[in-house]
Image: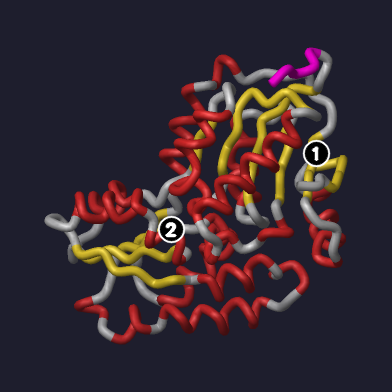
Amino acid sequence: MKINKNLVTSVLIFDSGIGGIPVYLTIKKIFPKINYAYIIDNDSFPYGDKKNSFIVDRIIKCIYKVHKKQKIILAIIACNTASVISLRKLREVFSFPIIGIIPDIKSAVKITKNKIVGLLATKATINSAYMKRFIKNFSSYVIIRNIIVSDIINVVENMFNTTYQSVYKTLSILSPWIEDRTSNPDTIILGCTHLLLIKKEIKNFFGRKINLIDSKSDLLKNVYIYKKSIFSIKKKNTVYYTKMEERIKILIQVFKEIGFEKFEEIFT
């Protein structure tokens, strides 16, 4: 694929929704003076109930569209589901470096006291071959329990045009991990970036000392690897969405508040 040398150089953040926002805000602290492009594939949200082949093809199409508009120097897949399913294929297709965010089981295993770890994630993440293999590798050290949190993710995706009461209400899905403290997780992995937006609410919901692993530390380590090669002439941060809808109109205001200035629909 030939790229116009005069294109704006950017770091790309990809997610099917707003889960990439906390990832962007974290990376922006490290690299405040570079361009960012954010793809929000809202037309296909949520990814958690989609087939693997659909997710891979969809991400390739979205990134390809943006790569024709901007020179991508680093792509960050800010979605656990997309990362565990598509990273290998994306690295085969594109020549620029691509990193993702993966549920950080290793850190959870290190800090758990009762040897019971909880994983909150989508059905697609939990059932992925990557996660099944990872969980099996640690099964002799800890018990790993899962809860599919698709309903929570859907509420969080719409949190900017709903009430926090709706967020707290949907957290009742996690109630089984409160009733018996002795046999339930003392350490919980937030296996979806949407959950990072309500980390405080999750902490308050449990109302006790509990370790929450947000999985950003490994991602940041990988970002630092490319620190010397990440540079660009600062212009305007751009959000690319895949469908104009009422929710996007609300999110445009949210993105403006965190440093994005241009907004464009891409057709896939």
The answer to whether residue 34 is left or right of residue 97 is: right
The image quarter containing residue 211 is bottom left
Q: Which residue in the protein does label 2 denote?
A: 125
Q: Which residue in the protein does label 1 denote?
A: 238
Dot placed on the residue nearer the N-terminal end, 1 or 2: 2
Secondary structure at badge 2 equals helix
Which residue does the image show at 54% across and 58% down from the upper left? 196
Q: CA distance from mark 1 to mark 2?
A: 28 Å
Residue 262 drawn at (x, y percent):
87, 41
Kind of residue at badge 1: Thr
The numbered mark at residue 50 is none
The image quarter containing residue 252 is bottom right
Q: Is residue 202 above or below residue 170?
A: above
Residue farthest left in this picture: 140
Foreground mark, 1 or 2?
2
The verdict on residue 159 being magenta is: no
Q: Is residue 128 above or below residue 144?
A: above
Q: Is residue 29 above or below residue 199?
A: above
Badge 1, how many Cα within 10 Å: few under 14, some, many 20+?
many
Which residue does the image show at 42% across and 65% down from the upper left? 120
Kind of residue at badge 2: Thr
State which region is magenta.
1-5
Which residue does the image show at 18% across and 60% down from the upper left? 142
The type of colouring in the image is secondary structure
Badge 2, how many Cα within 10 Å: few under 14, some, many 20+?
many
Residue 125 drawn at (x, y percent):
43, 58
